[in-house]
Image: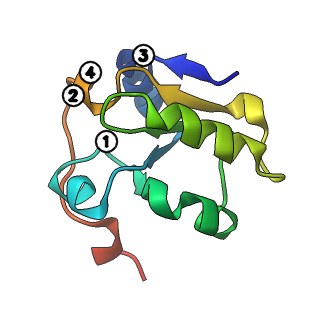
Amino acid sequence: MVSEIPPEDVKAKLEDEDVQIVDIRSESEYERGHIPGAINVPMAKLATEIDEYDWGDDVVVACPIGQSSIQAARLIGSFEDVDSDAVASMEGGYREWEYDLESGSVADTED
C-alpha cells in the first residue's frame, strides 16, 4: 500500500527535510512549472530508467491529479535499492498544489 501525503505536508517537507520530489508528468508539462527541486522522470520512462537514479530516503511522487503517482510510487518502492515505506504519492497531484512552482528544465543547469 502506497501512502498518500497532502500537498501542504509536501511543502513542509521541502522546507524542513531532505525530500526527493519525482515529477512523472511529460517534459513539456514539467518545464511549464514544477515543485521546486523536483526531478522529472516521465511515467513512460520510469520503468526503464528506474535504476539510473539515486533514490533518497524520503521520496514523494507527483502527477497531475494524484492517481498515476500512486502507481509510480509503487514501482519505485519495489526497486531493490529503495525502502518501500520511504515512497509516497502526493495526494491530489498538481491540481491540489497551491504553492510556487519553478519553471524551465533542470537539465539546462546540470552537467
Q: Is residue 50 above or below residue 63?
A: below
3D distance between C-alphas at marks 3 and 2: 12 Å
Furthest residue toward right: 80
The residue depicted at 81 percent of the width and 53 percent of the height is 81
Q: Earlier in the sequence, mark 3 or mark 2?
A: 3
3D distance between C-alphas at marks 4 and 2: 9 Å
Identity of the amino acid at label 2? Tyr
3D distance between C-alphas at marks 2 and 1: 8 Å
Find numbered disc 4 in the image and state the secondary structure of the residue it sits on: helix
Residue at image mark 1: 35
Identity of the amino acid at label 1? Ile
Residue at image mark 3: 6
Q: Earlier in the sequence, mark 3 or mark 4?
A: 3
Say whether marks 2 and 1 touch (CB < 8 Å): yes
Q: Earlier in the sequence, mark 2 or mark 1?
A: 1
Crowdedness near tag 2: few (<14), some (14–19) or many (≥20) residues, C-alpha within 10 Å: few
Residue at image mark 2: 99
Q: Earlier in the sequence, mark 4 or mark 1?
A: 1
Q: Earlier in the sequence, mark 3 or mark 1?
A: 3
- Number of the front mark, 3 or 2: 3
